[in-house]
Amino acid sequence: MNRVELVGRLTKDVEVRKTQSNLSVASFTVACDRRVSRDQQNQGQQTADFISCVAWRQTADFLGSYARKGAMVAVEGRIQTRNYDDRDGKRVYVTEVVADHVQLLESRSQSQARQDTAPTYPSYQSEPQNDPFGTNDFNSADFNTGPGLDISSDDLPF
């Protein structure tokens, strides 16, 4: 099975061209955050993969009309590989996602508001704090309502 689902932001405005048979084709790149280890999160390291995508026909026209740099998108499609000879005669190999469906995940007003403000980036704590997974955004004192559990790692089923 060859299925891909991506959620990320467009790295630049979508480029739409027409083929000789007058079909629309859009080329774009989606930046998808990569999950990183807890140690990397604590060091403030955030990585992203930049995935090349292509869309055809109405999907390409839609993207050309409404999608702009920085827009949050969801892409469904399949991975395709191809190759060609460049102008110097060298073989070039390309791997890309052929998009079957693309959805804009934010409204036009949200997109405009994001563009009007300075870019904000997630902040990372340099030292871990009472959050073993680095994911909770609450005050743990709110949940201390009863006696604690004394469980050793030998008691866990995994």
Image: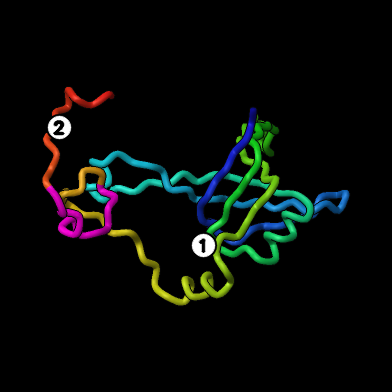
Residue occupying the far right of the picture = 21
Sequence-wise, which precedes: disc 2 or disc 1?
1
Magenta span main SS: loop
Q: Amino acid at mark 1?
A: Gly
Q: Amino acid at mark 2?
A: Ile
Q: Which element carries disc 1, helix, strand or loop?
A: loop
At x 15% / y 49%, what residue is drawn?
A: 130
Q: Is residue 138 magenta?
A: yes
Within-10-Å neighbours for mark 1: few <14, some 14–19, many 20+:
some
Residue corresponding to mark 2: 151
Within-10-Å neighbours for mark 2: few <14, some 14–19, many 20+:
few
In the image, residue 147 lies at what x, y percent?
11, 46
At x 51% / y 62%, what residue is drawn?
A: 70
Q: What are the residue bounds of the magenta stretch?
A: 134-146
In the image, residue 51 lies at what x, y percent?
54, 44
Residue 70 has which mark? 1
Camera-nearest residue between 101 and 71: 101
Classify the position of the N terminus by image quarter: top right
Q: Which element carries disc 2, helix, strand or loop?
A: loop
In the image, residue 104 lies at what x, y percent?
60, 60
User: With 28 as the anchor, is 127 left or right in this view?
Assistant: left
Q: Is residue 54 depicted above or below 86 in this figure?
A: below
Q: Is residue 30 depicted above or below 12 in this figure?
A: above
How many numbered discs, if any?
2
Distance between the alpha carbons at the discs numbered 2 and 1? 46 Å
User: With 61 as the anchor, is 93 left or right in this view?
Assistant: left
Residue 149 has which mark? none
Residue occupying the far front of the picture = 146
